[in-house]
Amino acid sequence: MIVITTPTGKIGSRVLEIVVAQQDTSGEKVRVIVRDPGRLPEEIRDRIEVVTGSHGDREVLDRAFAGADAVFWLAPSNSPAPSLEAMYTGFTRPAAEAFVTHGVGHVVTVSALGRGTAVAGRAGHVTASLAMGDLIAGAGVAHRALANPAFMDNLLRQVNSIRDRGVFTDTVDPDHRLPTVATRDIGAVGARLLLDRSWTGTGEVPVLGPADLSPNDMAHTMSDVLGRPIRYERQSFEQLRDSLTGHGLPEPIVQGYLDMMRAVNDGLNEGVPRTPENTTPTSFREWCDSVLAPAVRA
């Protein structure tokens, strides 16, 4: 029995898609925790068990984890929380206890690059995510944290600006090349770990995407794919603060984003050498063709 949280999110839905597609050969039962079952793909609803509710709720977790062998765990970044601790370890603590209560053997989580770097302790959301991983590992389960850089899919938050102004923003230097990954590839790695549970102990699995890219590299590719000039504007941290505050985020959460982006500039995502094992297939051009362009043209 595999339990999947956030099954309608970008990463969780990809995990669900792959795990269900493998059911005939794997023999795995699949259970999901979801607030709105109506958002699940209709074609798979009769192949899975559904527990309705929040995966931050102890009663929901007790129902979902009963008989579970493995869990895909993702702390939702859009949940209302007064602090980073509440968003990550606070939200996850009931699950860590439920892993023990129900004898869950394997847990795969979504985390971030940065562990072991000089800035890991002052990287805002990343620091809190790493602490969440430590909490889960301390529960005695076999644990793998998917250690990710920035997501290509984060650009979807700027679709209106890309469409209307031909501009996207970030806080990194225009020519600073960094790893970036498609969420579909993160989900694929997570599904592979859930289906082949021969691993033991605790550790991280870096997921680096296919190549390091700078904002200027990305602008060039977007311009080619969209058939119009797209340019990058570097945003100051003060501008980023104003933007996040304008979306109504609590000050500790805003500060967490600022600290994370400062840490990115200081090498947070550059501590893991690229290897064939941590390089994933979806190129930025392919992602732009299949995801960004349809969104811009919608």
Image (spheres, rainbow, N blue to C red):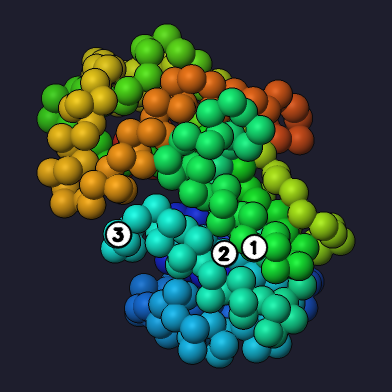
- Secondary structure beneath label 2: strand
- Provide residue 288's location: percent of width, then percent of height: 40, 33
Asked if the residues shown at circle 1 and circle 2 are in contact, with their CB atoms under 8 angstroms apart, the answer is yes
* Quadrant (top left, top right, bottom left, bottom right) of the N terminus: bottom right
What's under tag 1, amino acid-wise?
A: Ile
Above/below status of 118 relative to 96 = above
Q: Nearer the viewer, residue 27 or 249?
A: 249
| Front of the two marks 1 and 2 | 1
What residue does disc 1 label?
136
Q: Is residue 59 visible?
A: yes
Residue located beneath label 3 in the image: 82
> Is 171 situated above or below 5?
above
Question: Which residue carries the number 2 mark?
Answer: 73
Comparing labels 3 and 2, the label whose residue is closer to the camera: 3
Local SS, label 3: loop
Disc 1 and disc 2: Cα gap in Å? Answer: 10 Å
**Which residue sits at x=53%, y=28%?**
119
Residue kind at label 2, given as amino acid type: Trp
User: In this view of the protein, can residue 148 be seen by the observer?
Assistant: no
5 left or right, relative to 65: left
Q: Position of residue 220 (x, y in %)?
A: 37, 14
Residue 115 versus residue 175 in the image, above or below: below
Asked whether disc 3 touches disc 2, contact meaning CB atoms under 8 Å apart, the reply is no
Amino acid type, label 3 = Pro
The one nearer the camera, 203 or 160, is: 203
Q: Earlier in the sequence, mark 1 or mark 3?
A: 3
- Badge 3 crowding class, 10 Å Cα cut-off, few under 14, some 14 to 19, many 20 or more, is few
Mark 1: secondary structure: helix
